[in-house]
Each structure stands twice: as C-alpha cells, then as structure tokens.
Image (spheres, grey):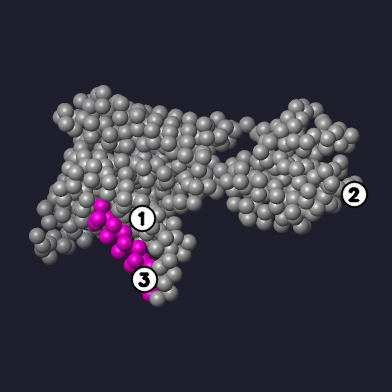
Amino acid sequence: MKLSAEQLTTFLISISFMLFFAKLFGELCGKLKQPSIIGEILAGIILGPTVFGMLAPELSAKIFPQTPQITVAMDGITSLAVIMLLLVSGLEVDLSVVVRQSKTALFTSFMGIVFPFLVGFSLAYTFPDYFGINEENRKLVFALFMGTAMSISALPVIARTLMDLNIFRTEIGLVIIASAMFDDLTGWIIFSVILGMLGQGGHGFSFLEKLLFVFLFVGFMLLIARKIINKIFPYIQKTFSYPGGVLNFIFILGFLCAAFTEYIGIHAIFGAFIVGVTVGDTAHLREKTREIVHQFVTNIFAPLFFVSIGLRVNFITNFDPMLVLIVIALAFIGKVVGCGLGAYWGGMDKSDALAIGFGMNSRGAMEIILGLLALQFGLIQERVFVALVIMALFTSVASAPFMNSILKRRKKPTLKDLIDKDTIIFSKSEDRISVIKELVHVIAEKYRLNEQDIFNEVWKREEKLPSGIENYLAIPHAKAKVSKPVVGISVCKEGVNFESGDNTPSKFIFLLLSPEGQNETQLQILAEIAERFANRSKVENLLDLDSSEKVASKLIEETNKNI
C-alpha cells in the first residue's frame, strides 16, 4: 500500500495544519498559564468532526481524508509519537527522589493507586451497562481498565504545575513527584497486563507468561541495564559526535525495547517508558541532552498525537453530560481522598496532605493515551473516551488553583509546632561550623533534604553575620527548599562561641530553615525563639535537663509564656 503523489501531498498538508494549529492554541494556553496540551487537544477538536467537519464537511474531507493509505500513515506517525512521548516521560522519573521520599511517598502512592482503583473498578463492575459494556466476557477487563484510569497520574503536567506554584523542590513537591513516578510506573504495568488479557499480540504467550516477562524486563532494566548504561554512557559521549551519538543511542534503545514489549503482547509504550526511566537515571546524561530530546518530542511529535485525538471523535455527538460528571467525580474522590489519606498517614499534616491529594489529581497526557489505546482496541465506546478526555483536561486545569488555595490558607506555624524531639541533640562540639554541620545532618535525615545545599546556605549567612544572641542563645538560619519552617536544636552545655551580644557562649543553638519567599514567617519564628529565651535564670534551668524528650516537653509546655 503506497501513497500516490496526490495522497502524499494531502498527507503533508494535513500534518502542516495540525502542527500550525497545535502551536497556535498551545501558545495561547501558555499565555493563560495553562498546560499546552489543552490547546493542542482543542486544536484537534476544532479541526476534527466536532467543529470544522460540521461547518465545512467537504473541505474537511479534502484536508483530512479517511482513505486507507492516509489513515495508515497517520496511525504510524501517531504511534511513533506516543512511544516517544512515553520515552520522554520516563526520562523525567528520578529514582533517587523516590528513595529520598520513601516513607511518605510510599503511603501516598500506595493509597493513590489502591483507593481510586477500587472506586473505579467497583462502579464499572457493578454498572457495566451504563458504560456500554454488554458482553459478560469484557466486564472484568473493562472494570480493571476503569480502575487503572482512575489511578494513573500525569507526571509532566504535575511537574509543570509544581514549577508554576514554585514548590517543585519543597517537601510537598518532592512527595508529589516521587508518588506520581511510582503511580505512573505501576499504572502502565497494570494497563499493559490488561492489554495482554485482551489478547492483543503476544505471539501465543499466555497471560502468566506475559506477566512474568513484564517483571523480568522491568527488573533487568532497572537493576542491571541501568548500571551497564551508566558505564557506557561516557564512552558514547566521548567517541561519537555530540549530541547526535547520545540521541541516537537513546532512541535506538527506546525503539528496541518498545518492539520487545509489543512482541510479547504488552504495548510498545511500556517498553519506551521503562527505557526512559533507565536512561534518565544515569548520572552522565547531560541536562542539555535531556532538554534536546524533550523539545524535539514535545514540539513536533506530541502535538501531532494530541491533535489527532480531536480528529478521531465528534466531541458533541458523543458528549454525555451525566457520564462526564460521574467520571470527573470518581477522579476527584478516588485520587484526592486516596492520596490525601496516604500523605496524612505518611506524616504530613492535614492541609499539606490535602494539597498533595489535589496535586496528584492531574491526569493530562497519560489519561488520554490510556483512553485512546482502549478505544483503538475496542475496550471502550467513544462517549466513554470523550468523558475521559474531558476529565483529563479538567483535572489538569483544576489542580493548580485548588493547591494554591489550600497552601495560602495553611495556619501559620509557631515554635510549638516546629519542636520535635527527633531534631534535638546534645553536642560536645567546640566551634560553630561543627555544631551547624551536626544540626544540618539531623534535619536533612529527618526531612529528606539535601544536606550539602542546606549547610552551604546556612554557613554562607553565618559567616557574614554571626547569629549569637544574649542568654546562651544562637539562631543560625537560612531560606531553603522546604514547604514549611523546620527547626533543629543543639544543647551544648560547654558553650560555643557564636559572637553573642553579651559575650557569653551559646548553649542553645536553634537552626531554623524557612521556605523561600516567606520573610514574615521567618521573622516571626526568630522573634518567638528570642522571646522564649529572655529570662537567663530560666534558661539555665533548661541546662539541667538530660534528654531530648525532656527538652522538647519543657519548651512545648512553656508555649504561652517566656521561659
């Protein structure tokens, strides 16, 4: 089946129209502080049967003809686009972040998968007829799909939202990113298994064989291939021209692994995603290379894929208001409640946990890819697909304002809220730098922060202006990538010279880290600490205490009065 000269001309004109309108609407959405994916999908809806096809059906049929040759060519382009898009998404996964935020992220991601999965699965399994599933043998598979659709997040959209809110590197931001990474990985494994249950490809492999291949493939890539790639990457960068050699290697490996997973009956996108995770984790991958891959895919191939979504379905004739509301409600209830509870059980306070729940609720590209594949394999009807696309767009747009509102309404922390026996130490250090290093280490361990970065910021300020105050007190402090203030306390009974105003050695050293841009909060806590230590004789009584538990208890007990 070969394209004639006329068909090739039409095909190239179609691609040009798609790219032009995708860029135009994507840029407009960017000006409105919305993800460009929304504009790209709107461009497809306008160019497709929903708008252009209804207003000018003959012209639409000429620009976007449905001939077998052109349809095959367009399917090939969009399949390539979605494979590369998942490769780029994998490159954004930082496995070290998952490890650093292990406890809270584990609770958040576990509940962010299990709870929405149960919500989506239960409703779809109980009322399959409402979703257009009449065949008994498709009931279980469809319910599994809906559970997965409610569970998955969109890592690229989430990352963009966190950057827009300036909380990407804060505690909340890192928990959301780590949880979203794990959710995406788990979600694609589940969906790949679902496709296997549908009997899509697989060259005769049984369901259990496919499942075994999936876990062997993931284990090999993340445990063995990751180390091999990390060793050969410097050789590739040194031997071959830059950046061509590295780009060539990444895409070759991505396409080969995509071909492997497609061969065993697990969709090609899964292989590409795992390669992205594996390559993205190497320390030798330059940021410039990552950016080149990202720009190439997200500005050429990804827009073609998202525009093609609008070309496939009439969003007016397949729009079911009640179904759309049900799907959106399921998405919010499942993800916000599930992730919120997980974050709360993982140690976050209620407001932060709720913010994490809304942050994890962005579905974006991942949901749409999931829905499109299900539509192509005949698992869902067009009205369900339309509902999923609208839900993906709505959750992506709504996450930022909901998070921003919650973060702004958080109660201002007081010293009582920040005192923690786990960050109180008794030290025998004799100089400022040693005490500060000890406190930075304790805080970094407790809150999973970058120890060296924190120390650099604290010590840079301390060198310029020593933080010693009267009555045995010193308060070294700095701004840091934290979502809320953090305090560590060192009790040095011998005293350390922090150049205090009354020339006495400092025996209580409070290390305060406060969020960037929150000057008022920092000043309030500094003043509160100084006020608590206004009475020297009562401060001296604190030196008789012999455990961090007793110090924490006494400081909290004296919350409403000077010690």
Q: How far apart are marks 3 and 1 (CA)?
A: 21 Å
On the rendered structure, is 99 left or right of 437? left
Q: Residue 26 carries which label?
A: none
Q: Is residue 552 above or below residue 476?
A: above
Residue mark closest to the camera, 2 vs 1? 1
Determine whether, in the image, residue 495 is placed left or right of residue 320.
Answer: right
For the point 23% across and 31% down, the residue is 140
- Label 2 with label 1: CB-CB less than 8 Å: no
Q: Magenta part mainly helix, strand or loop?
A: helix
Residue 403 in the image: above or below residue 159: above
The earlier-in-sequence mark between 2 and 1 is: 1
| Callout 1: SS | helix
Most extreme residue toward the top is 126
Amino acid type of the residue tagged 2 in the rendering: Asn
Identified at 26% across, 31% down, the residue is 143
Mark 3 and mark 2 residues within 8 Å of each other at the beta carbon:
no
Magenta span: 240-261
- Residue 76 lies, with reference to residue 233, above or below; the image says above
Whole-percent x, y for residue 156 in the image:
41, 48
User: What kind of element bears circle 2?
Assistant: loop
Residue 387 visible somewhere in the drawing:
no
Mark 3 vs mark 2: which is more N-terminal? 3
Are the two marked residues, 3 and 1, in contact with CB atoms closer than 8 angstroms?
no
Instruction: Please state which amino acid type lies under the numbered disc 3.
Output: Gly
Q: Residues within 10 Å of mark 1 (few under 14, many from 20)?
A: many
Q: Name the residue under label 1.
A: 221
**Disc on res. 503:** 2
What residue sits 65% from the left and 49% below the top? 441
Q: Position of residue 167 (x, y in %)?
A: 54, 45
Residue type highlighted by circle 1: Met
Q: Name the residue under label 3.
A: 245
